[in-house]
């Protein structure tokens, strides 16, 4: 048995791609567009090599492969030099560094010959916090009884079935764009929470003073969206569903307080990038 966690830099800035792949996109019009497309193709080529190796070693039939991204596409105007990023969020609101769907909803691909039918599609949410309990279940492992996890065993999602969750999906990024910093999802409902802390420069790592901001900021007001009917989060229906808003507000406050309380205080270097 083996586990491999393979991380690609592509297509994160700064983007640099093989010349032969860039040449395949000679028809690209915008500056940096061909470089970006070629970068995605380069990652695709690398993943193909891994899949071919599994086939050649006769391991494909007994190996689950999960492919996904960590966030939505980068914007072109966030920092100087980011002229090669040409990903698009489609109908989703926001992009990377947003707490809206364009920043956190990404496509995923699962490959498990004989277990997952090719071409199967599922709209069931699957998060990074689900990976550990899911793989443990599939491998026949047992999690310690005293281990508290936010994720769920999401084997059902690989079959296109509903995942039973004890804890709603939760996101918190204090350096997200604007004041919308926290979100929670339960079923088709998503509650977005703003905080009363300052509007910080989006992205980047921890800086002196950040801990005080994070631990003291309070959630202020909420937006409610039904993602089944409104994937683009265009209509805030909080006022129309006060009961749902109130129920999710209690849960998001509890989870937010839990996360803040458990957050470690890292020793920051004297000089930060």
Image (spheres, rainbow, N blue to C red):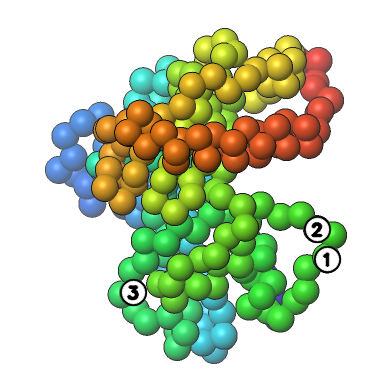
How crowded pointer 1 is (Cα within 10 Å; few <14, some 14-19, many 20+) is rated as few
SS for dot 3: loop
Extreme-front residue of the structure:
243
Using the rendered image of the protein, determine whether residue 257 is visible from the camera's viewpoint.
Answer: yes
SS for dot 1: loop
Q: Quadrant of the C terminus?
A: top right
Residue under the image location 34 percent in, 46 percent down: 227
Location of residue 249 in the rendering, given as x and y in whole percent from the top left corner: 54, 34
Q: Which mark is residue 100?
A: none
Q: Which mark is residue 147?
A: 2
Location of residue 240 in the rendering, given as x and y in whole percent from the top left corner: 32, 33
**Dots 1, 2 in contact, CB < 8 A:** yes
How crowded pointer 2 is (Cα within 10 Å; few <14, some 14-19, many 20+) is rated as few
User: Is 242 or 34 nearer to us in this picture?
Assistant: 242
Residue topped by disc 3: 120
Q: Which mark is residue 144?
A: 1
Q: Quadrant of residue 140?
A: bottom right
SS for dot 2: loop
Location of residue 197 in the rendering, given as x and y in whole percent from the top left corner: 59, 13
């Amino acid at each position: 048995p083996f586990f491999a966690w393979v991380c690609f830099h592509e297509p994160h800035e700064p983007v640099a791609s093989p010349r032969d792949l860039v040449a395949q996109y000679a028809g690209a019009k915008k500056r940096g567009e061909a470089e970006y497309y070629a970068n995605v193709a380069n990652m695709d080529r690398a993943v193909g090599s891994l899949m071919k190796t599994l086939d050649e070693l006769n391991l494909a039939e007994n190996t689950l492969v999960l492919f996904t991204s960590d966030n939505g596409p980068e914007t072109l105007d966030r920092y100087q030099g980011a002229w090669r990023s040409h990903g698009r969020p489609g109908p989703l609101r926001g992009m990377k560094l947003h707490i809206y769907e364009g920043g956190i909803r990404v496509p995923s691909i699962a490959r498990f010959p004989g277990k997952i039918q090719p071409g199967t599609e599922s709209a069931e949410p699957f998060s990074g916090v689900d990976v550990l309990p899911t793989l443990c279940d599939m491998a026949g492992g047992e999690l310690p009884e005293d281990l508290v996890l936010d994720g769920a065993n999401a084997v059902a999602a690989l079959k296109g079935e509903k995942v039973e969750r004890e804890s709603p999906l939760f996101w918190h990024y204090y350096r997200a764009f604007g004041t919308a910093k926290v979100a929670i999802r339960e079923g088709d409902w998503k509650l977005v929470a703003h905080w009363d802390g300052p509007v910080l420069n989006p992205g980047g790592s921890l800086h002196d003073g950040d801990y005080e901001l994070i631990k003291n900021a309070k959630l202020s007001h909420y937006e409610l969206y039904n993602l089944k009917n409104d994937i683009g989060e265009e209509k805030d229906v909080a006022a129309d569903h006060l009961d749902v808003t109130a129920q999710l507000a209690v849960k998001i406050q509890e989870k937010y307080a839990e996360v803040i309380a458990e957050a470690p205080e890292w020793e920051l270097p004297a000089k930060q990038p």
